Structures are given as C-alpha cells and as structure tokens.
Amino acid sequence: MQRIPILRMGKLLLVTIQVDMHDRLATVLKDDLANRIFETRARGLLIDISALDMVDSFIARMLGDIAQMARVMDAETVLVGMQPAVAITLVEIGVRMTGVSTALNVEKGMSLLRTRLDKERADDDAPAQ
Amino acid sequence: MMTPLRSETLPLREEADILLVRQLVREHAAELGFGALDLTKLLTAASELGRNTLIHGQGGTVVLETLVKNGRRGLRLTFEDKGPGIADLKQAMTSGFSSKGGLGLGLGGSKRLVDEFEVVSGVGEGTRVTVTRWT
C-alpha cells in the first residue's frame, strides 16, 4: 500500500506530501504519524503541502485532525507551503482550519517550531522561584 | 444545443476513480487555458462531488465536457448516480449539514466554486449534479 514518508530531524518530524492525496492515504498518514510521534517522542511536526494543487474538505479535516492529535501527544504542528489558490478555495467552501499553525515555507515553519522548543527548554532551565 | 468539443465518461466505483477524474480535469483545464485558481476550484469541486457520488450515491459516473460558448471556453462535469437520492435538497445545500458525518461542505461548497450549478434528485431515483466553469 502507498504511504507518505515521514522523516525525523531530531525532535521534529517532517512530512512532504508529493502525491495527489486521496482519502485512504490521508487516513493512513494520520495513523502513521500518531505512531511515529509516540515512538520518537517528537515535539514538533512540519507538514509541507506546497506540491498540492487542491485540498478538499476531507483532506483539510484530516490535516486538522492530525494537528489536534499531535497536540494531545504534546507535539506542535505547523502546516507550510499552502498555494494561494488552495487557500482561497478553502475559505470559499467554508473550511476553517482552526487549531493549525501555518507558515509560508519549510524554512519559516522549521524556525517557528525551533523557537518554541528553545523557549520551552529555557523555561525548563530557569531556576525555580 | 451546445455541442461539446470533447466528451469523456468515467466510472466512479472506488476512491482511485476520483484520482483519475482529477487527473483528467487537470488535462482538460490545461488545454482550455484555465489559470491556477480556476484549476484548483474545479479540482476541489470535482473531488467533493465525486466523493458524494461514491459515498451517498453508492457509485455512478462522471462526464467531462469541453465547451465553447460566445467565444468563451468551459469545462462541464456531470456526476450521476442511481443511489437513494436527496430528500431535502435545500437542507443538503446548507453549509454544515451532513448525513454521513462529513464536514457537510460538499454540495453547498462546490456551488461556490463554479459558474453554473444544477442538481436534479428524487428519492429512489438517484442524483445528477452538473457544474460548469468558464474561462
């Protein structure tokens, strides 16, 4: 069965969706990510959708579900690279991607996640009052 | 009567068929000279309506037609199934209404993505949704 690869970079997981998404593939990705977050104790998840020329309501819901699921496993999700036409279309059909952080591209998404992790580490290291 | 320049019929029996429909929409749209936003809107509408035919209509067909009218070119998609039909069309068109636990954006959402939209449905008679987008 076709699967979307999940790469590990330290405390982060990186997913680049390069294929035309269908419902089953999106559902499998969600399950795979839950397992990988658990196994790797990842703290952040970066999903690059720059190659997608369409995100329909099902795929959008799955992306939202992934972010929510990651959140309850203590990992932050950033969605990057959404094409302008995709953003316009999602808003037009009434999809609200609440609870999902976004960034313009992989680089900006990565620095957003790193900043959050660094801040957490600084908070942990701070002497107790 | 407008004669389509090109017409193709595809079955919609399983999820992989929706990918084929999207691929054909990409090809037709490129030939017609649709821009990126037009293409994304058509692909999204095709995906939502194809899923409706598959899930709610228990499968069916889609016809893709390339049209020319008053110098404008268009792409028309007709989704047809022999499923249970829609009892309350007004309710089905309402954003957020879903009988199958989806987001309920399929029918109403698709309407906003195209220039022309028509639904014909009767209980026990199936459903036919026709959408057209012009360049």
Image (spheres, coloured by chain):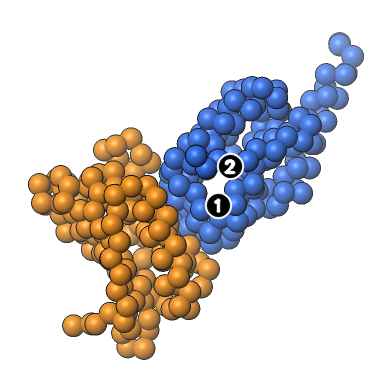
Chain colours: A blue, B orange
Q: Position of residue B34 (x, y in %)?
A: 47, 74
* Location of residue A41 (image quadrant): top right
Residue B102 seen anywhere in this rendered image of the structure: yes
Q: Residue at x 36, y 39 (%)?
A: B102
Taking the image as shown, residue A42 lies to the left or right of residue B88, namely right
Position of B116 relative to A119 (above/below): below
Q: Label 1: few (<14), some or many (≥20) within 10 Å?
A: few
Which amino acid lies under the numbered mark 1 shown in the image of this protein?
Val
The image position of residue B38, as x and y in percent, is: 46, 68
Disc on the earlier residue, 1 or 2: 2
| Residue A71 can be seen, yes or no | no
* Callout 1 touching callout 2 (CB < 8 Å): yes
Chain where mark 1 sits: A
B63 sits left or right of A18 in the view: left
- Residue at 50% x, 39% y is A1
Identity, as a three-letter code, of the amino acid under mark 2: Ile
Please name the residue shown 62% across and 55% down the image.
A50
User: In this figure, which residue is indicated by the disc labeled 2?
Assistant: A4
